[in-house]
Amino acid sequence: MTDHRADQGTGPDSGLPAMRKSLLGQLELDMRLMGMVGAFIAIALAFNFFTEGRFITPRNTFNLTVQTVSVAIMATGMVFVIVTRHIDLSVGAVLAIASAMGAMMQARWLPQVIGLDYGNPMIAPLAILTCLTVGTLIGAFNGWLIGYQGIPAFIVTLGGLLIWRYVGWYVTDGQTIAPLDKTYLVLGGAEGTLGVTLSWIVGALAVAASVYALYNARKAKKSHGFPTKPLWAEFTVGGLIVAVIIGYVATLNAYDIPTGKLRRMFEARGEVLPDGYTEAYGLPVSVIVLIVVAIAMTMLAKKTRLGKYIFATGGNPDAAELSGINTKLLTVKIFALMGFLCGLSAVIASARLASHANDIGTLDELRVIAAAVIGGTALSGGIGTIHGAILGALIMQSLQSGMAMVGVDAPLQNIVVGSVLVFAVWIDIQYRKKLGIKV
Amino acid sequence: MSSNPNTGTPLVELKDISIAFGGVKAVDHVTIDLYPGEVVGLLGHNGAGKSTLIKCLSGAYQKDAGEIFINGEKAEIRNTRDARRYNVETIYQTLALADNLDAASNLFLGRELVTPLGFVDEPAMEAETRKIMGRLNPNFQKFKVPVSALSGGQRQSVAIARAVYFNAKILIMDEPTAALGPHETQMVAELIEELKAQGLGIFLIEHDIHNVMRLCDRAMVMKNGQKVGTVNVGEVTDEDILGMIIMGKKPPQAY
C-alpha cells in the first residue's frame, strides 16, 4: 500500500499533488487527443503551404467538412463495434443498399406506384425513414447472427460486404437513380446551408451549451467534494472550445455563394438578383447532423447504462456476462445502431451527390475503420472515443483532399493513406506502452 | 461420528445437485448447507467440481438436477441476475473485473446508479465507491484510473466491495487470496472475519490448507464430482483434511 498519498487532494489548493502537476497537467487534457489535433493542424498547414494558401480557405473548409460527414457518422458507430471486439466490414455495402432503397422510394415507388407528386412534402421524410429502417434492420440481423448464432463478426460482415451492395444493384437494376427530391437534397451539403444569421445563432447556442456543460461538470465534482482543476485551467479549456466554434462559424460565414448560383436561386423565386448582392453559405445542415450524432453518441457512451455495458463487455466479456449483462442482446443493439448510422450516412452521401449510383460508399468500410482506429479505438477492445473517431475521419479526408489539391497521383494517395494508418497505430502503441496501459 | 453443529433454518441448502457436461458428471448428487455467520470451505483437487457446484448457486451454470433452498424457500436461479435477487454475491477467481473501467464502474457494473433522467450518475457512484472503499481498504485512493493499473490486492478489494456493497447475505469467494501477497491475504482474512460477524454466510473455495484451518468453520471435500464428506474444522487436523482431498478418505469425524 504505497499509494496512499496520491490523489488525496480535495481541491485545487490542497498541497502536494496539485503542486506536483505541471501547468499542462493541470489542464487535464487528453494528451492523445491533443496529439491528434496537433497532427491535424500540421497536415492542414503543410497542405496550405504546398497549395499556396488554397487549403485553409472558407471554400475548402466547407468542402472538407461536408465530405467528412458521411464517414464520420459511421465511424462513431464503428467505435462501439470495435470496442466490443467486433468489426463491421459491411458498412459501405449497407450504405449502398440503404441509399438504393431511399432513392427508389423517392424517385420511383412513391411517385409512380403510390402516386405522390414530385415535390410532395411527404417524399423526403419517407425516403429518409426508408434509409434508416433498411440500415437498422440489416444491422440488427448482422447482430443477431453474431450474438445469438455465434458467427464471427468478421465473417458475417465480410459476407455482407459482398451481399448488400449487389442486392442494391438488383433493386435499382444497376441504374443511377436521379433526380432526388429537392427537400432531401438539403441534407447533402451545398444545397442545405443555414446562412449567416442562423449560423451565428447555432454557434452562440453551441458556445452556451459548452460553457454550461463545463460549469455543470465542475459543480457536480464540487458537490461530492472531488478534486477539481484550477479555475484558470477551466477558463483556458473553455476558451479554446469557444474559439474553435466561433472560428469555424466565422470561416463558413465567409464563404460566399457563387453569383451564378445566387442568380438561379433568385430566378427560382421569380426575383432578380440585385447588383452587388452577396450571400454566404454558413453552416451546412449535414454538419449539424454530424454534431447532433456526435453529442448523442458521446452521451450514449458516457452517460447511459448501454454505453457502460459496451465498454465493460469490450474490456472483459466474461465479467460483463457474470455481472448479469445480456451480451448477446447487446451485440444486436450495437450492430443495429451501426446499421442505423449507415442509413443516416446513406441519406447524407446520396443527397450530397444528388443521385444514387451503385458504387456509392465503395471502400467506405476501410475509411470508417481507419478513422476509428486513427482516432484511438483499440482493436483489442474496451478503448475508444467518439470525438477521436470523428477527428480520425477528418484527418483521413484532409489527407485525401489535400493530396488531390496538390496533384498527387491517385495510386500514391492510397499508399500515403495506408501508411498513415499503420503509422498512427504504431504511434498509439508506443504511447500506451510509455504510459503502461495494457493494449 | 460428528454432526452439523448448526440448528435452525439454513441460509442456503444445496440438495442433491447434479450437473454434467457432455457425459462427464462434473457434480454428482452433492448436498451442502450454509448457516448465517459461518464460513464453509469447499475443498478438492482442480476439477473436483467445487467451482461448478458453486456456479449453480451464483447463476453462471444451470443445474441438471437437485434443488436450491434459500432461507428455507425453494429458489429458482437461472442466471446471475436471479442469484443477485436472492442476495447471492460471487467473487470469482478471475475477479471478473472489466480492466478498462475504473473502480466505481466495476463496482456498479450491471447495477448502475442513474439520475431521474435515466443517465448514469457517475459522481454519485464515485462517492458511494469512496465510502465503501474507505471502510474496506482505507488506503485505496486510485478512483480515477482503470482497474488494470491496480495491484492484486487493490483489485481484490474492488471485487469484494462489489459483493459487499449490495447487501450480500450469501457470499461465494473463489480462491480470494490466490494472487495476493501475505499482507493482502491478511487483509482479506480480516475482512472475512468481519463479514462473518455481520451474519453473512460465506462459501470459500480454497486450496491453501492453512487458510482453511484458519478461516473456515466447516469444510466440505469433493473428489471427482462427488462429495467425500463434511467436517467441523475444529474437530479435525489438517492431515485429516488432506487425506480427504488426496485419497478421498473419510475420517470418523466426517458426516
Image (spheres, coloured by chain):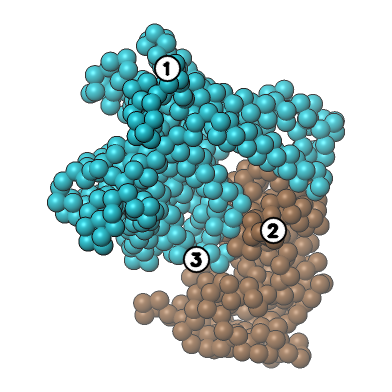
Chain colours: A cyan, B brown
Q: Secondary structure at mark 3?
A: loop
Decide: is B123 above or below A218: below
The quadrant in which the N terminus of chain B is found is bottom right
- Labels 3 and 1: the sequence-earlier one: 1
State the mark number for residue B115: 2
A273 or A324, nearer to the observer: A273
Please identify the quarter of the rendering in which residue A410 is found: top left
B50 or B85, nearer to the observer: B85
Q: Amino acid at mark 2?
A: Thr
Q: Amino acid at mark 1?
A: Asp
Residue A100 image position (x, y, % from top left): 25, 50
Q: CA distance from mark 2 to mark 3?
A: 22 Å
The quadrant in which the C terminus of chain B is found is bottom right
Residue at 45% in and 34% down? A193
State the mark number for residue A275: 1
- Mark nearer the viewer, 2 or 1: 1
State the mark number for residue A326: 3
- Mark nearer the viewer, 3 or 1: 1
For the question of whether residue A120 can be seen, the reply is yes
Subunit bearing disc 1: A
A359 on left or right of A401: left
Q: Residues within 10 Å of mark 1 (few under 14, many from 20)?
A: few
Please identify the quarter of the rendering in which residue A117 is found: bottom left
Residue at 22% in and 54% down? A108
Subunit bearing disc 2: B
Subunit bearing disc 3: A
B150 on left or right of A274: right
Decide: is A135 above or below B142: below
Q: CA distance from mark 3 to mark 1?
A: 65 Å
Q: Amino acid at mark 3?
A: Asn
Furthest toward the right, the residue is A14
